[in-house]
Image (cartoon, coloured by chain):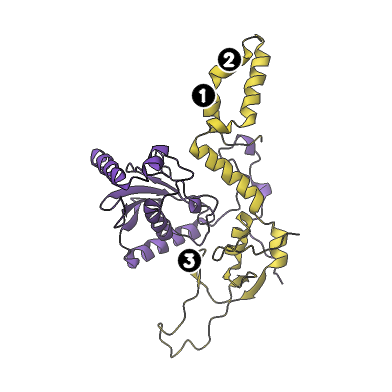
Chain colours: A yellow, B purple
Amino acid sequence: MHNHPPRVHSNFHARRDNIHDLSSMAFLPEVVSFRYHHIHMQLDINNMSHEDLLTLGQRIDNVKRGSSEEIIARQMRTKTYLLPNNLEGSTSEEQEINLCIICQDEYKNKEEIGILQCGHEYHADCIRRWLQEKNVCPLCKSKVLVIG
Amino acid sequence: MATNTIHGNNESAQPNNIASSKQPLPPAKTVDSQSVLRRLQSELMALMMSGDSGISAFPEEDNIFFWKGTITGSKDTVFEGTEYKLSLSFPNDYPFKPPKVKFETTCFHPNVDVHGNICLDILQDKWSSAYDVRTILISIQSLLGEPNISSPLNPQAAQLWSNQEEYRKMVEKLYKSAN
């Protein structure tokens, strides 16, 4: 709870009046500051703006859903992308263009491809980075890695 | 089987002032800024080639991380004939994180608040790195005609939605005063 977004401060200021009421019996500044601090730590979600809530939601989401690098490394299959050798004589229209949907770049010769259990393929680095955000396939949303 | 070259794993090199940092999250794994740039450029190309009707977007001068978009209300909805400007702001770790998308034109809609913030799951917890500007704009366009009434950001709009005739009048009135 110590590293929530600084924006929350604005709510804390908005609630100052209430806090004064609460602490009017205690004239010691330490007590007042303790109460401020306490309210501040609580994350007053009732008075948070839409954006504050989104930020908070995304933080919780990120903690909950990402996969650790070890799990990704253990469970993702990889292969090396090889360009077809018969480039000579074929026109560019005949060649299939293979894109990684994450970076939207074409696969280049000898790049490492990561394959998820659902069969969807991406650049290995791109999908590793994504799985650290969320444990779902970007295309079909299936949970791709079994935690544990 | 897995190979073991994992990049960007040098968190120890990050400053350890997380608590006071503007970023609430632990330092993100670095994303090559060139690859973000490349992706945004290829999105722009694809968007210009696609010829989708009723949606468009283009980067601001000098800053490809900030785009302005427009959406036209679909036919046979209360938003038909109205056009809305939006802003899209891309984070440095796009597409691993969604862009921030807001209405710049006032939009009287159950899932849009007075500041133009949009409540749409794919821009928040349902974001996927396979989405792009085009899919975002198409999603917002269909959100216009198919609001989620159960969790409104604009309760007044949610309440009025059942009366489409009155709603249309309200849209026209607000649209005229905003333009």
Left or right of A125 in this view: B114: left
- From the top left corner, tell me how far across and down residue A47 is, in percent: 53, 30
- Mark 1 or mark 3: name the one nearer the start of the chain: 1
Secondary structure found at label 1: helix
Secondary structure found at label 3: loop
Residue at position x 73%, y 66% in the image: A74
Label of residue A104 in the image = 3
- Mark 3 or mark 2: name the one nearer the start of the chain: 2
Residue type, label 1: Ala
Question: Which residue matches tag 1?
Answer: A14
- From the top left corner, tell me how far across and down residue A108 is, in percent: 53, 74
In front: mark 3 or mark 2? Answer: 2
Residue type, label 3: Gln
Label 3 neighbour load within 10 Å: few <14, some 14-19, many 20+: many
The picture quadrant where one finds residue A135 is: bottom right
**Which chain letter goes with mark 3?**
A
* Disc 1/disc 3 C-alpha distance (Å): 45 Å
**Which chain letter goes with mark 1?**
A
